[in-house]
Image (cartoon, helix red, strand yellow):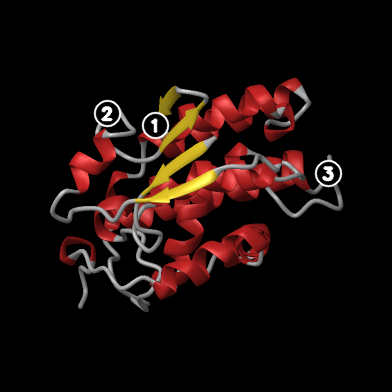
Amino acid sequence: MKLIIGNKNYSSWSLRPWMAARACGQSFEEIRIPLFMEGSRERILQHSPSGKVPCLIDHGLAVWDSLAVCEYLAEKSPSLWPADPAARAVARAISAEMHSSFQDLRENMPMNIRKDYAGKGRTPGVDANIARIEAIWNDCRARFGTKANPGGPYLFGAFSIADAMYAPVCFRFKTYGVQPAGAAGEYLAAMLAHPAMKEWEAAARTETESIPAEDLYG
């Protein structure tokens, strides 16, 4: 199994299936292709029919798009989704919402692990996105995390695809100094302390490539 990803500092979409693969213990070869450089698209097209990352290759089968890759991994490791049907339905709903929404946050607070942009990127649209994300985190922890699985620090107790989908937001909140209160803040701290998140962050900080369009605030 091979997972084609972009720069760890910038590629939020790459982080999601990488976290899911790490969480379910799947063994895979990581192929990192720096984005927006000469020849980047040609190199990606050697693996991914969409010309974009991430892309998972499993015995010749290509699966692209972050959520599709996570779903494919869940076929092999069903524990990546909550076992309870109601929790699983909500986990899928918030994962899909993350996949398709929060455009203001994406545009004004791109993932950029190496930077300290505390206080930057705040607009009314971004603040509305942040409020919605915090509401999701608080609701999931209250309904499916704390009550259903008292020992689990993640949205549905045990780590799931939903957590993988929100992992880049956690790095964004750290970079831009967003500090949720209550259960949402506790969840953010648990995610940033996850061993795989720390591994990804450490690797991102060693990268030297720069994408000017993502370094919005200098």
Q: Tell me the amino acid under the disc marked 1.
A: Asp
Cα separation between marks 3 and 2: 41 Å
Q: Is residue 163 visible?
A: no
Q: Nearer the viewer, mark 1 or mark 3?
A: 1
Q: Is residue 181 left or right of residue 13?
A: right
Q: Tell me the amino acid under the disc marked 2.
A: Ser
Q: Which residue is mark 2?
A: 50
| Nearer to us in this view, 173 or 14 | 14
Residue 178 percent coordinates (x, y): 46, 68
Q: Which residue is mark 3?
A: 147
Residue 22 percent coordinates (x, y): 63, 47
Q: Tell me the amino acid under the disc marked 3.
A: Lys
Residue 218 percent coordinates (x, y): 20, 78
Q: Quadrant of residue 71?
A: top right
Q: Which residue is mark 1?
A: 65
Cα separation between marks 1 and 3: 33 Å
Residue at 28% across / 34% down in the picture?
A: 46
